[in-house]
Amino acid sequence: MNSATQLNRLAVLDHSRLARSQEGSSRKGHISVRNVQVEFGSDAGRRVAVQDANLEIRPGEFVCLLGPSGCGKSTLLNAVAGFVEPCAGELRVDGQRVKGPGPERGMVFQQHSLFPWKTVKENVAFGPLMAGVGKFEADQVGRTFLGLVGLSAYEDAFPETLSGGMQQRVGIARALANYPSVLLMDEPFGALDAQTRIMMQENLLDIWREFHNTVLFVTHDIDEAVFLSDRIVVMSASPGRIIADIPVRLPRPRSQDLLTEPAFIALKRECLALIRQETLHAFEQQNATH
């Protein structure tokens, strides 16, 4: 088999795998959080970060975790990812108990966490290589996903030569390269300028429509939560409890024109009132301890 024939075969294989991923999205990606509590520290200085959290996320849903700073949003996300072990309760993905990180859960961090000594394509291909895919096919997967995030021209570049937004697109491509049923995102656009952030939000929704993975997205930005999600799960000030689960029934596909629509503004006000109430409660607690 010559190299051109092999390349075509692998391209077909890659698109076939993508199609299977999309077909399976209606069956996979169910997240179940039941009575989860997460604590840090020793006995004397023990701190409850997440308290009695209960949450069900259906396959293919886009859910945002929203709350004041320090409320445990990222802690709960990291527990779903398998990086943090709850001291009580249970986490399951597609019926399987979460006991650590797994390839069915892709993670995108606020800081891109790319390997600086690897090229962009090598970063994206790393996951498939670790999963036992041959180098040639892993490179093809890398190219496919770089194309998906609009970075085909930069496959041989190193991360430090890219802008922040481009680095995050590489991070998203790397998270998707194992075809996960769940995509976990921890304030991935928080460090970007306003215009780049808007473009990244739109790009993410395009990717989500392509794959229809389940997405659990942490943010403290109310506009971002309303614009992206099917549901907004609001957490209280520390210790983090789930205090509201707000459906977002805005039409899709969405564009930035939506931000001035009355329905968008009404949802924003509802979220803002909840966050303000929790933030004031946190200030009162802090003042009471001093």
Image (cartoon, rainbow, N blue to C red):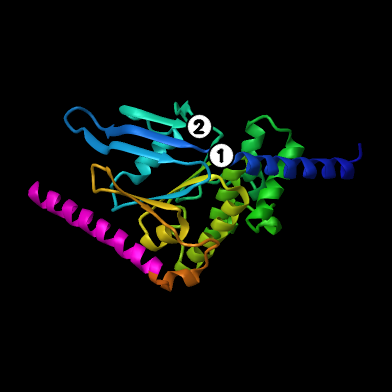
Within-10-Å neighbours for mark 2: few <14, some 14–19, many 20+? some
Could you tell me if residue 290 is visible in this image?
no
Give the side of residue 209 with respect to residue 42, left or right: right
Name the residue that disc number 2 marks.
Answer: 94
Horizontal and vertical percent position of residue 147: 69, 54
Horizontal and vertical percent position of residue 29: 52, 38
Callouts 1 and 2 close, C-beta under 8 Å: yes
Seen as rendered, the residue at the extreme right is 2
Q: Which residues are magenta?
A: 263-290
Whether residue 113 appears in magenta in the rendering, the answer is: no
Reading the chain from its start, which is encountered first: label 1 or label 2?
2
SS label for mark 1: loop
User: Which label number is shown at residue 181?
Assistant: 1
Which residue does the image show at 56% across and 39% down from the upper left? Answer: 181
Number of dots carrying numbers: 2
Which secondary structure class fits the magenta region best?
helix
SS label for mark 2: loop
User: Of the residues shown, which amino acid type is indicated by label 1?
Assistant: Ser
Nearer the observer, 123 or 48? 48
Give the side of residue 216 with respect to residue 75, left or right: right
Which residue does the image show at 64% across and 31% down from the upper left? Answer: 131
Horizontal and vertical percent position of residue 90: 37, 28
